[in-house]
Image (spheres, rainbow, N blue to C red):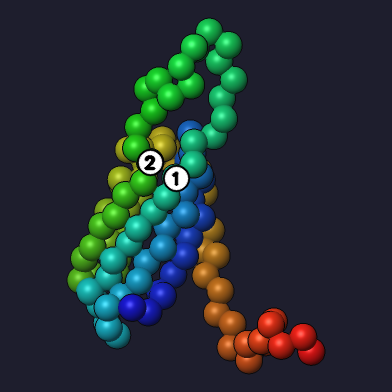
Amino acid sequence: MELVRTYMIETTNALFTLVVTEDRHGGPYKATYVGTRQKVELPWVDNPGLGQKDLDGEAADVDFDVLIATCHRQIAERGGEILGIQDISVIDERPRRDWGSGH
């Protein structure tokens, strides 16, 4: 699998990392996302896990744009209104340094 894109998505109630990969050039595409709920101080709630929904998910499609739209919809259902999306994909074509060589 080849990495295609990585996004950081902020919603009203959570922060998500969305990773999209493709099986071969041109799709099909697979997306997985992991969400972290923002900490909310509620002194009257005894159980901090009370009412939490599962924030993680995945989807697949042959069309990249359809897949992204599906993920945005699922993320909004889990974390609230989408406030911002940042493409944090890193394309680093520099030679890799062998950190274990001691040089």
> What amino acid is found at the position of numbered circle 2 in the picture?
Leu
Q: In this view, does 59 lie to the left or right of 47?
A: left
Q: Which residue is drawn at 47% across and 54% down?
A: 17
- Figure check: 49 above or below 34: above
> What amino acid is found at the position of numbered circle 1 in the picture?
Gly
Q: Where does the C terminus fall, quadrant-wise?
A: bottom right
Q: Position of residue 18 (x, y in %)?
A: 42, 57
Q: Where does the N terminus fall, quadrant-wise?
A: bottom left
Q: Whole-Å distance between the Cαs marked 2 and 1?
A: 5 Å
Lower position in the chain sequence, tag 2 or tag 1: 1
Instruction: Tell me, yes or no, if residue 12 can be seen here.
Output: no
Identify residue for label 2: 55
Q: Residue at x 44, y 70 (%)?
A: 5
Residue contact at pointers 2 and 1, CB within 8 angstroms: yes
Quadrant housing residue 82 = top left
Q: Where is residue 46 in the image (x, y as percent from the top left)?
A: 49, 12
- Figure check: 14 above or below 63: above
Residue lying farthest to the top in this orientation = 44
Identify residue for label 1: 35
Q: Is residue 22 left or right of residue 49?
A: left
- Figure check: 82 above or below 7: above
